[in-house]
Amino acid sequence: MKRFVLIGFASLFVLACSNEPSQQVTTLGSLLKEMTDFDAVAKYPSPVYTLKQASSHDRRSIAPDKPGWFANTDYNQFIREEKNDGRTEYVMLDAEGPGAIVRFWLTTVVKPGIMRFYFDNEADATIEIPGFDLLKGFDGLGPALLNPHTSYEPDGKGGNTLYLPLLYQKHCKVTWEYTDTTAIDKPHYYQINYRTYAPGTNVETFTPNHLTTYKSDIDQAEKTLWKPAAASGEKTTMNQQLPAGGETSVALPGGTNAIRTLAVRLNTPDSADYEKIWRSTWLKITFDNHETVLCPLGDFIGSGYGGHKIASWFRDLSADGELTSRWVMPYQQTAEITFINKGATEVGIAAAATVGAFEWDEATMYFHALYKYEENIHDAKWDYDVTKVATEDSTAPIDWNFATLSGKGVYMGNTLSINNHMETWYGEGDAKAYVDNETFPSEFGTGLEDYYNTSWAPVILYQTPFANAPRADDPSSKGYNTFTRTRMLDAIPFKKAFSFDMEMLSWDGGTIDAAATTYWYGFEKP
């Protein structure tokens, strides 16, 4: 196969589904359409897939009851070293197909080198990228599909996140070559999320020609991800003052339907209370007599404490205070929305739910949002002695659990709202996602900010379709901070259970208050 040096295109990612392998072909075009289909996430994936992540996490992390579980050298950790035509290549990903890379995050302090993508066991790389920098290989994609990080420097520090799906039928290998020996010891971090389909699933292997063949699909996806279309349907509205301690409910149209959008405005007589009411005004939603959503409005929408602006694919909170949720929430017979005022002051609520018909079948799932809050969490200094066993050391870091879910469903992301009591960065720890009671996580990350599609802390504000930092009170990270990330093609299916942890590691050690809101779709009713 002739080698192709890919320069000048962009990023994105989308995948299609069907419960059994079939002759239907999953293509770049079909994945891009799935990526921009709000209904798709409410159905269990077909064709079925597993979602894994290859990353540069510290390989000394083996198990919670072994030394090194909180080791923090999360860079230059490759699967193996290979010799190829006289050059040394370090393997970042080695995955059997059929499958697809659906999220590729990386960052570094120096970029010289060559990254190569080998598809379907070909001897020559299909893609060569000059440097540890996806922008160098996919320049031309819009920032929805290829997100430069807030720390990005073209010839130095920083990185980017690619959401353009890269499909393969038989196999995929990604390697890195250092072309400057002085850069070998400089930090290079990466995370590669990829789907693996069942044997027999028909996938169209990526070629550079697809960037031309599917250009209209790429352009349409980029446009749609930044400007989602308004939903149509029947509107149910309410507008009232809710006293302290009060609650009010509204029933939605009966029958097999789905909430397409939910819009809410809050107001308070005293502007000094405005930040508080986004945490003290709670949203509860009941579908078919089962409660699946219960959390503060600010956390539900991804803004966290204070009601700060967010602009993303599933959720918006405008600068003038209008909340818009675009999570599709199907139900078979009944649905009810309730607002609860847990604060000490009166709150004005104006809300409108747009409800439309939905085709319910055996793959349809209910939407869930789970909230957890804890104060004064121990956030240990990151130079913890890796020779010690954390489970036997009372001063060791901890894995703080966002949520532990049971049953069958699909994890769709989370919002993390922090009140940092320290003077310096609190988020040195790695994200860990466990599927179906596995003992080692399907995803083992490289740092809190990395999970949320940026790099190099502390972090400044940013807005992208699938990841956002809507609040950062201080450049040091002291005070309130909010990060949120939702998923589409990188959503994680689970059959029995799902659990998500974040290591509590910081630069200097101290405490934080943390509020985590987890989003998922599931069959099991609570």
Image (tube, helix red, strand yellow):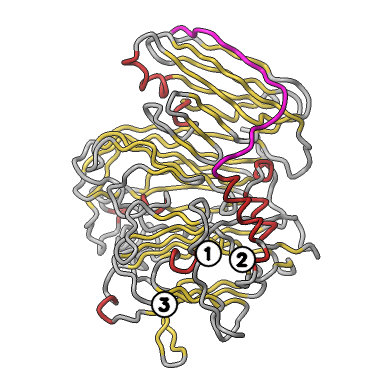
| Residue 306 numbered mark, or none | none
| Label 1: element kind | loop
Foreground residue, 150 or 467?
150
Please tell me which residue is depicted at 54% across the width and 8% down the height of the picture.
240
The numbered mark at residue 114 is: 3
Q: Residue at x 46, y 35 (%)?
A: 302
Going by the numbered disc 3, the residue's amino acid type is Ile
On screen, 311 above or below 140? above
Q: Are marks 1 and 2 in contact (CB under 8 Å)?
A: yes
What is the span of residues highlighted in magenta in the rendered image? 226-243
Q: Is residue 302 left or right of residue 234?
A: left
Q: Locate residue 427, reporting x and y percent.
A: 31, 48
C-alpha separation, residue under disc 1 versus residue under disc 2: 8 Å
The spot of residue 259 in percent (x, y) is 66, 29
Instruction: Return the x and y of residue 469 as percentages of the image width and height.
Output: 39, 41
Amino acid at the residue labelled 2:
Leu
Q: Residues within 10 Å of mark 1 (few under 14, many from 20)?
A: some
Residue 211 — which label? 2
First along the sequence among labels 3 and 1? 1
Q: CA distance from mark 2 to mark 3?
A: 21 Å
